[in-house]
Image (tube, grey):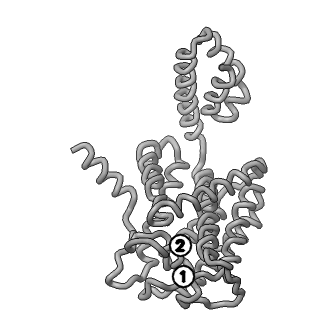
C-alpha cells in the first residue's frame, strides 16, 4: 500500500517530492488505516493535489521553457517519422540500399537511399543533443535535418505530382489523400524544430531519458502502421494541447508555446503546392476543437 501511495505522489513536481514525499505518504497511510477503498481515495486525492502543484509550478516557467518542451516533443516525432520511413522502404525482401542522389522515380519506393540514412542520423542527433544538453550538437543536427528535409521538399517533391519525393512511402496502402506526412508536409515541422531547438534553454538530462525517447518514437512508429493516415492520428493529441493552451495558457505558458508550434506544423498551407484534384489536410486544430465542442453542446 505504501508503494501504491508513493506512486500516486509522482503526480507532484520533482522538487516537491524530494522535500515532502515521505511525509505525505506517512500521513496518507495513517488516514487509510489499512482500508483498500480509503487507499484508493487517498491516492486519487494525491494525484489531484499533485496536478494542482504542477499547474502552480508551471506559472513560474518562461516561454523559453516552452520552446524546450516543443523541441523535445517534435524531436521525438521527427525521429519516429524517420524510423517509420526506413521501416516502410525496407519492406521488400531483401531491402535495397542505394547511396546516390535524386531518387524520385516510383520504381524506387522501396529503396533505403542516402536521404533516409541521413534523415535518421540527423533526427537521432537532435534527440541526443537535447538529452545531453549539447547545444552545438542539437542545433547542428537540426540544421542538417532541415537541409535534408528541405532538399527533398524543394528539389525532389513535385507539387503537381502526388507520387513524388521520399515521403510518398507514407501513402502506400492508404485510402484517400488524408495522409501525413507526404510531399512537402514535413518541411514546416523541420523549420519549427530548428527554431525551437535554437531557442530552448538546454540542460543535461538524466541518461535514462534517451531510451525513453527511443521507446516513445518506436511506439509512434507502431501507431502510424496500425492507424489509417500514418501520422495523421497526432492531430488528436495536438487538438487536446490546443484546448489546454486556450484554458490554461495564462497559467502555463509552456502549453501555449507547444500548441502554437504544433499549429504551425499542421497549418502549413503556404508551403504546399498540390494538384487541384487532391485535398490536403491543413485544417487548424483549434478551430476543429471549437466546432466539436459546439456540436457536442448543441
| Up/down of 235 relative to 50, above or below | below
Determine which residue is flagged by label 2.
186
| Up/down of 64 relative to 147, above or below | above
Along the viewing direction, whichever of 135 and 211 lies nearer the viewer: 211
- How far across and down, in percent of the image, does residue 199 sit? 64, 61
Q: Secondary structure at mark 1?
A: helix
| Up/down of 254 relative to 137, above or below | above
Q: Residue at x 44, y 79 (%)?
A: 272
| Mark 2 vs 1, N-terminal side | 1
**Which image quarter holds the C terminus?**
top left
The picture quadrant where one finds residue 195 is: bottom right
Q: Residue at x 55, y 40 (%)?
A: 59
- How far across and down, in percent of the image, does residue 254 sit? 55, 49
- How far across and down, in percent of the image, does residue 139 sit? 70, 67
Contact, CB < 8 Å: mark 2 with mark 1?
yes
Q: CA distance from mark 2 to mark 1?
A: 8 Å
| Up/down of 258 relative to 144, above or below | above
The picture quadrant where one finds residue 135 is: bottom right
Q: Residue at x 58, y 35 (%)?
A: 54
Mark 2 nearby-residue class (10 Å; few <14, some 14–19, many ≥20): many
- The label number, if any, that marks residue 153 in the structure image: 1
The picture quadrant where one finds residue 191 is: bottom right
**Which image quarter holds the N terminus?**
top right
Amino acid at each position: 500500500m505504501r508503494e501504491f501511495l508513493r506512486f500516486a505522489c509522482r503526480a507532484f513536481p520533482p522538487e516537491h517530492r524530494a522535500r515532502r514525499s515521505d511525509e505525505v505518504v506517512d500521513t496518507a497511510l495513517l488516514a487509510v488505516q489499512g482500508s483498500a477503498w480509503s487507499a484508493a481515495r487517498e491516492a486519487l486525492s494525491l494525484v489531484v493535489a499533485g496536478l494542482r502543484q504542477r499547474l502552480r509550478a508551471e506559472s513560474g516557467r518562461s516561454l523559453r521553457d516552452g520552446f524546450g518542451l516543443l523541441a523535445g516533443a517534435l524531436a521525438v516525432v521527427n525521429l519516429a517519422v524517420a524510423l517509420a520511413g526506413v521501416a516502410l522502404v525496407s519492406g521488400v525482401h531483401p531491402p535495397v540500399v542505394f547511396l546516390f542522389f535524386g531518387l524520385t522515380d516510383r520504381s524506387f519506393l522501396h529503396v533505403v537511399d542516402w536521404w533516409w540514412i541521413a534523415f535518421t542520423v540527423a533526427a537521432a542527433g537532435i534527440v541526443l543533443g537535447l538529452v545531453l544538453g549539447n547545444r552545438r550538437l542539437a542545433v547542428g543536427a537540426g540544421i542538417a535535418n532541415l537541409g535534408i528535409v528541405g532538399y527533398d521538399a524543394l528539389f525532389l517533391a513535385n507539387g503537381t505530382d502526388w507520387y513524388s519525393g521520399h515521403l510518398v512511402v507514407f501513402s502506400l496502402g492508404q485510402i484517400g489523400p488524408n495522409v501525413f506526412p507526404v510531399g512537402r508536409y514535413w518541411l514546416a515541422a523541420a523549420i519549427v524544430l530548428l527554431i525551437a531547438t535554437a531557442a530552448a534553454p538546454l540542460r543535461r538530462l538524466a541518461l535514462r531519458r534517451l531510451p525513453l525517447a527511443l521507446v516513445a518514437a518506436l511506439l509512434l512508429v507502431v501507431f502510424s502502421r496500425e492507424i489509417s493516415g500514418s501520422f495523421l492520428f497526432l492531430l488528436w493529441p495536438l487538438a487536446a494541447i490546443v484546448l489546454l493552451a486556450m484554458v490554461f495558457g495564462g497559467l502555463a505558458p509552456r502549453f501555449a508555446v507547444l500548441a502554437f508550434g504544433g499549429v504551425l506544423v499542421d497549418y502549413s498551407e503556404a508551403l504546399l503546392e498540390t494538384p487541384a484534384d487532391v485535398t490536403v489536410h491543413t485544417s487548424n486544430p483549434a478551430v476543429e476543437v471549437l466546432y466539436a465542442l459546439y456540436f457536442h453542446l448543441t
